[in-house]
């Protein structure tokens, strides 16, 4: 499995005049457990939508710094009338990483986020590379 290319956390990213375009931005929060408010019900898989660029810059932040692992970014493609077919997944780490997907799934693909079960909050920014 290919690993994302990490970018050091202190790196300044300047998007002015660049080919990076913000494609997705969202914060997810887990629900506190009704029986024990200090615990959280793990977040479910989140559908992020359609993307066309095979090269993505992903920035993930969280309030839980107990682990660098943030979850998995899963790739799907449209398989016609039967729905969506799973293609591959990438592990997500806190911070910023560049992910390149193979182009063999066509011009458009879909992403979902499966957050780490120990995270109570997760923010994700996805930038697409455009020519």
Image: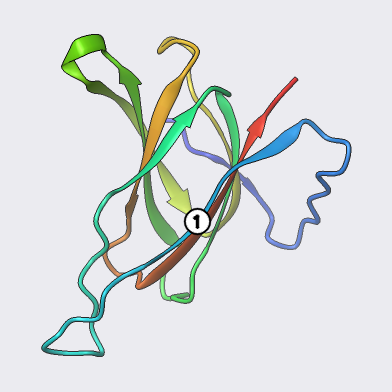
Q: Residues within 10 Å of mark 1 (few under 14, many from 20)?
A: few
The residue under the point 20% across, 12% down is 81
Task: Residue at 25%, 81% (x, y): give it.
Answer: 32
How many marks do you count on the picture? Answer: 1
Q: Which residue is mark 1?
A: 26
Task: Answer left or right for 23 relative to 130.
Answer: left
Q: Nearer the viewer, residue 77 or 63?
A: 77
Residue 38 percent across, percent down from the top left: 26, 89
Left or right of 3? Residue 114 is left
| Depicted 37 relative to depicted 65: above or below | below
Q: What secondary structure is marked by label 1?
A: strand
Q: Who's the residue at 49% across and 24% down the image?
A: 101
Image quadrant holding the C terminus, namely: top right
Residue, far left: 35
Q: Say which quadrant the N terminus sits in.
A: top left
The percent position of residue 14, horizontal first and vertical second, equals 83, 48
Q: Is residue 54 above or below residue 66?
A: above
* Direction right: furthest residue: 17
Q: Position of residue 17 (x, y in %)?
A: 88, 36
> Is 22 in front, or is 2?
22
How are the colours assigned in the image?
A: rainbow
Q: In the depicted view, which residue is nearer to us: 8 or 75? A: 75
Q: Looking at the rendering, which quadrant does residue 43 occupy?
A: bottom left
Residue drawn where x is 30% and y is 70% of the image: 30
Quarter location, residue 76: top left
Image spot of residue 86 (x, y percent): 26, 25
């Amino acid at each position: 499995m290919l690993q994302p290319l990490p970018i050091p956390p202190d790196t300044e990213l300047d998007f002015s005049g660049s080919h990076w375009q913000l494609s997705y931005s969202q914060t997810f929060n887990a629900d506190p457990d009704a029986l024990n408010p200090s615990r959280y019900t793990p977040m479910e898989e989140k559908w992020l939508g359609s993307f066309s660029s095979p090269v993505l810059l992903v920035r993930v932040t969280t309030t839980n710094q107990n682990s660098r692992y943030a979850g998995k970014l899963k790739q799907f493609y449209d398989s016609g009338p039967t729905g969506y077919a799973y293609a591959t997944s990438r592990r997500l780490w806190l911070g910023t990483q560049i992910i390149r997907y193979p182009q063999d799934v066509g011009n458009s693909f879909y992403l979902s986020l499966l957050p780490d079960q120990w995270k109570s909050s997760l923010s994700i920014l996805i930038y697409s590379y455009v020519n």
